[in-house]
Image (cartoon, rainbow, N blue to C red):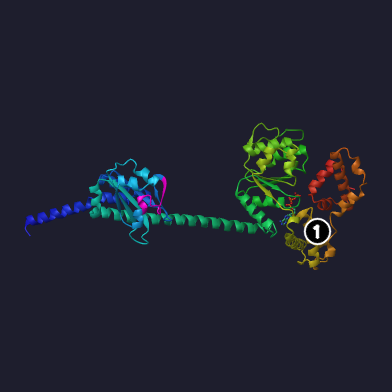
Amino acid sequence: MSARAIDMAQGEARQAASLGLAAMPTALALVECATPAALRACSSRLLRDSLGLAWVECLFVEGSGRWLGRDDADVRLDCDDFRHPYAHAIRRGEPLDLSVAEARTRLDHPDFQAQVAALPGALRLQIRPLRALDGPREWLGALALAGEADTLAGLAADAEFAAFEALLCRLWARLARAQGERQRSAVLRDSLAKLNDGARRQSLADQLADDLLGDSAAMQRLRSQVIRAAETQLAVLLQGQTGTGKDCVARAIHRFSARAEGPFMAINCAAIPEALLESELFGHAKGAFSGADQAREGLIGQADGGTLFLDEIGDMPLALQAKLLRVLESGRYRPLGASDERCADLRLVAATHQPLRERIRDQRFRADLYYRLGQFPLSLPPLGERREDIAPLAQAFVADFCAREGRDEVGITPAALRQLRERDYPGNVRELKNLIDYACAMSPPGADLEASALPGEASEPVAEAHAAAPPTASARVDDLRQALRDFEAELIRQRLRYFDGNRALAAESLGVPKRTLAHKCRLLEVDAP
Ligand SMILES: Nc1ncnc2c1ncn2[C@@H]1O[C@H](COP(=O)(O)OP(=O)(O)OP(=O)(O)O)[C@@H](O)[C@H]1O
C-alpha cells in the first residue's frame, strides 16, 4: 500500500472512530443516571435538544402494570383506557403516529389533552412503547415525542436513535430491577428487624415470667407491656388492687430498662407522716428545721440516673403533688432550706390502688399530675379475674416456702387446689402467698398441702364485724367521714384482737401492707391489744 493510501486509510479510520465516539457523551449522560426517574428526565432532555423536538415526555408503567405515570405530575393514565394514545401504543406493542390535531379530536382523555394543549396542531406526535430487552421483557413505559413530520418519520430508520432507545431500555430495566431489589431488601430488612424486635421482646417477657408468674392472657399481656414500658423513659402509673404485684412490676420496669445499673429508690407515700414525706423526697439542707443538724439527700437526689418508685401516690398531700409535678416537668428540685436548685435525671414509676379519677373529682389529687404520671398507664388485673393463675402461683409459693425453710419440696392435693381456686382474694396475690405460707407451716414436712391446712376465708372476721354492729347503727350516722374512720378503727382493732396483736397477720388478712396498717393505727389512734 502506498504512503498516501495508508494516510487515507488512517484518516478514514480516525474519522470513523471519532464518529462513533461522538455518541459517547450522550451514552455517558444516560449511564450516569442513578435512578429510573433521573434516566427518564435525562433521555427526554437529550432527545429534545439533539432532535430539535417541540415536546418530549417519558412516562413509566407502574409496578403492577395497570397504569402509566408521569414523574413531574400526579397523573395516572390507565393502560386499558383507550382515550389516550399510550394505551393504544402499549397494546399494539409498536410506535403510534398521529397529528396533534387528530389527537385533539380523537383522544379525549383529560390528562392527555392537558399534555398536548399547548402544542401547535400542525406538529405530529409519536408514541413509542418501551419494554425491557432482556429478562422478563416487562413494559417500562412510553416515549411521547412531538415535532416536525420529517424528523419523526426518520426515526424508524435511524440506527443511532435505535441504539439510544436500546441503551435507554437496558439501563432503565437494570435500574428499575435494582431499585425493586433495594426496596424488597429494605422491606425484608424492616420485617427482619421487626421480627428480631418481637423475638427479643418475647424473650425478655419470658425472663420476666420467672418473677411475675401467671400464664393467663392478662398476665402475658401485662408482661409484654412491662417490657415495652421499660424500653421508654416515660413515667409509668401502675393501677391495681392491693397485692396485685405493683411493687414487683415497678422493680421489673427498672431491671429491664436502660437504667438497670442505676439506683432504684422506693417510698410508700401512705406510710410516711405528711410532715416527713417532703424531706424524705426532696432532702434538706443543714439547719433547715430543728433537728436537721446535717444536710441530707432526699430520694429524688438518690434516684439520679435510676428509677424513683412512689407507692400509694394517691395519698400524697396536695402541696407535695405540686412540687413533684415541677420535678417531673423541669427535672429540677430544691431540698428543704437549700438556696440552690439541683437536677435529677430519673424515671418515675408511681402506683396506687385508689381510683385517682375519683380523687381528682374530690379535688384531692391534681389532674395535671395524674396525666403527667400516666404517660404509660398500666393496669394490674385482680387475681379473681385470672383464676387460672391461682394453681401455678400456689405451687410456686409452696416451692418458695420449702426452699426458704430447707424442706423437701411438696405438692398440693387436688382438694386443696380446688379450695384455693374457689376462694375470694381481696388481698390478691399477697393474700394467696400468705395463705400458702401459713398452710405450709401448719403441714408436716414432706407431706403434700391438704385442704384441711388452709385457714377459713379471710373475709369471715369482716362479716363478724358487720354482724356485730347493731342494725340501727347506720341510722345514727350524721358524719360519714367520722363514721368511716370509726368503722375502720373498729375493724382494725377487731382484727388485731383476732390475731393476738400480730400486726403482720392482721395486715395480711386485710390485704394491706404492714406499713400501711401501722400508719393507719397511728392515724386512727388504734393501740395493739
Ligand atoms: N404475678 C406475681 N407472681 C409472683 N408473685 C407475685 C405476683 N404478683 C404479686 N406477687 C407477690 O405478691 C406480694 C404482693 O405484691 P406487691 O407488693 O408487688 O403488690 P402491690 O400491688 O404492690 O401491693 P400494695 O398495693 O398493697 O402495695 C409480693 O410478695 C409479690 O412478690
Instruction: Check if residue 176 falls in the magenta segment.
Output: no
- Which sits in the foreground, 457 or 261? 457
497 sits to left or right of 165: right
Tell me the quarter of the picture where residue 180 sits. Answer: bottom left
Question: Element type at marker 1?
Answer: loop
Residue type marked 1: Arg
Residue 355, visible in the rendered structure = yes
- Which sits in the foreground, 445 or 285? 445
Residue 485 image position (x, y, % from top left): 85, 42
Residue 388 image position (x, y, % from top left): 73, 61
* Residue drawn at x 74%, y 38% as measured from the top left: 361
Residue placed furthest toward the top: 339
Instruction: Check if residue 85 falls in the magenta segment.
Output: yes
* Up/down of 41 relative to 135, above or below: above
Number of numbered discs on residues: 1
Residue 417 image position (x, y, % from top left): 78, 64
Query: Residue at label 1?
Result: 423
401 sits to left or right of 249: right
* Residue drawn at x 61%, y 51% as measured from the top left: 228
* Up/down of 509 relative to 268, above or below: below
* Up/down of 265 relative to 191, above or below: above
The magenta segment is 74-87
